[in-house]
Image (cartoon, rainbow, N blue to C red):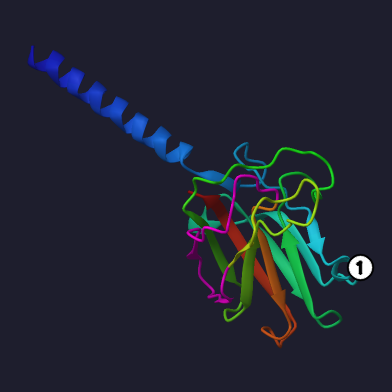
Amino acid sequence: MITNNFSKVCCLAMFTLNIVGCAIAAERVYVYKDDGDDVNKGVWSSIMPKEAADTKALTFITNSPNGFGGKGTSVKIDFNLDNYPWAGLVAPVNDKYWGEKDYPGLDLSKMKKLVFYAKGDNGNEQIQVKAAFISNKPFGDSAILPVVSPWYVLTKDWKRYEIKLEDAQNNLKRVISPFSVITNNAHNPNGKFTVHIDEVFYE
């Protein structure tokens, strides 16, 4: 009887842990977890502005090894701002999607914060993050004002960053631009630098 009761307790505990784990997973919407992961809702595909892409002010890969915690992959972004003053990389919900056609967006209206991990190759690199900023298109973001972070000064080690989504004007019922990384040579006078991004999610 003791063995049977112990087994029932263990099964109940495992069931509870599974339920909690599923609940946590359900409360997160990943823009990027690992390269090629099925949970990814963002597609790293759009360099802005077009002139920055033409002058190769930004190049990137989405399968850089040694992601946060030494596991999985991360997004590696190489900036070269010698010939252009600013550049940004956007992860829209569809490849190079800018809201001209009726493509489904993400309902992030119940999310409380945007979380991501970042680091720089040398430290002291500065970036800004924006989301839900394509509101001037027929099928763009529903936010009245975009989500905009302060300027972050990166370190050489992975660090977690959080952006609270408490602004009532940020209507995130429909989001087609869930994450972007932007920088300029005013904040990075060296011009050439590398940034790594990983584990981007809303919760």
Q: Residue at x 47, y 59 (%)?
A: 166
In reply to whether residue 133 is colored magenta, the answer given is no
Q: Is residue 190 left or right of residue 155?
A: right
Q: Is residue 179 left or right of residue 25?
A: right
Q: As rendered, which of 176 and 155 lies closer to the eye?
A: 176
Residues in magenta, as a range: 149-176
Q: Position of residue 175 (x, y in %)?
A: 66, 48
Q: Please, what is the dominant secondary structure of the magenta stretch?
A: loop
Determine if residue 131 is in view: yes
Q: Which residue lies under the disc numbered 1?
A: 54
Q: Is residue 140 left or right of residue 179?
A: right
Q: Residue at x 74, y 69 (%)?
A: 78
Name the kind of residue labelled 1 in the image: Asp
Determine if residue 32 is in view: no
Picture quarter containing residue 40?
top right
Q: Is residue 178 above or below residue 14?
A: below
Q: Is residue 132 above or below residue 190?
A: above
Q: Is residue 164 left or right of residue 19?
A: right
Q: Secondary structure at mark 1?
A: helix
Q: Position of residue 96 (x, y in %)?
A: 81, 50
Instruction: Give the farthest residue toward the top.
Output: 1
Q: Residue at x 89, y 70 (%)?
A: 51
Q: Position of residue 30 (x, y in %)?
A: 57, 46
In reply to whether residue 156 is colored magenta, the answer given is yes
